[in-house]
Image: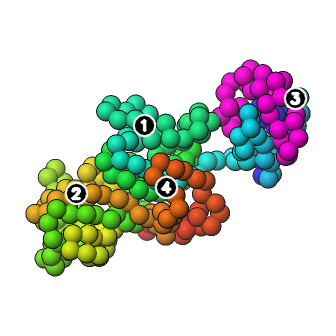
Amino acid sequence: MAKPLTLEKMLHVQGFGARKLCRILIHQGEVRVNGQVCDDPDAVFDLKDLHFTVAGADWQYREKSYLMLNKPANYECSHKPQHHPSVYSLLPHPLVARDVQCIGRLDEDTTGLILLSDDGQFIHRMSSPKWKVPKVYAVTTKHVVDDHQINALLQGVKLLDEEETIAAMACERIAERLIHLTLGEGKYHQVKRMLAAVSNRVEALHRISIGHLQLPDDLKLGEWRWLDANMLAQLEWYKAPN
């Protein structure tokens, strides 16, 4: 259990700026704790179930951050984007200040579910290829997907610059030009390269799930939300590989 902290330090570790700035916010009456204004930066609080507001925005103390984002197209999963805005620009500044990181990257034109966290162990567990956390993509193709292509994706295709063939964990045809492709790793442009290897082409790519965690229907493109205990439980069933 986290130890009690002064209000100033609590705001600092939650990403609200340098301790001097946090002290100024408190003295200006911008901070409420459990509904009450607190202008004493040295006041000590138990962090369990602590809710607070800063400049009217509601927050809950979290020792680590776990969140999901419905990534829009034309955003880059980088703190230093080159051609498009960063996905981090879609998050509140305190989360960026806490250095939350995308767990794996989606191409700039790919949309859908992406996880972010500042917990290094969680990031490794969800992103390392040896854990084979399944990720499902809705793939819209240029040409009709036939049985031969599906079988090839399941059996494994050879990609340039890869020594071994790469196979999908699952591949389900939803419509003539729409498949749900499940992968357990995330190589560079992997879905696009796999479809090209079977003489097809990706026209649109949308990630719909990671592990047992589905992208919620009510989470709009560009929106984010905290992962609650139930959502985290849908990711925590992964066991260490033998």
Q: Give the image's coloring scheme.
A: rainbow
Q: Earlier in the sequence, mark 1 or mark 4?
A: 1
Mark identifier at residue 86: 1
Distance Cα–Cα, label 1 vs label 4: 17 Å
Query: Which residue type does callout 3 highlight?
Result: Asp
Q: Earlier in the sequence, mark 1 or mark 3?
A: 3
Residue 198 versus residue 193 in the image, above or below? below
Q: Which residue is mark 2?
A: 203
Tell me the quarter of the picture where residue 108 sits: top left
- Label 3: state its secondary structure: loop
Q: Neighbour class for label 4 at 10 Å: few (<14), some, many (≥20)?
A: some
Q: Nearer the viewer, mark 4 or mark 3?
A: 4
Tell me the quarter of the picture where residue 231 sits: bottom right
Q: Which residue is mark 4?
A: 220
Task: Check whether the beta carbons of the residues at disc 4 and disc 2 lie within 8 A of each other.
Answer: no
Q: Looking at the image, which residue is at 49% across and 36% down?
A: 89
Instruction: Give the extent of the magenta segment.
Output: 11-39
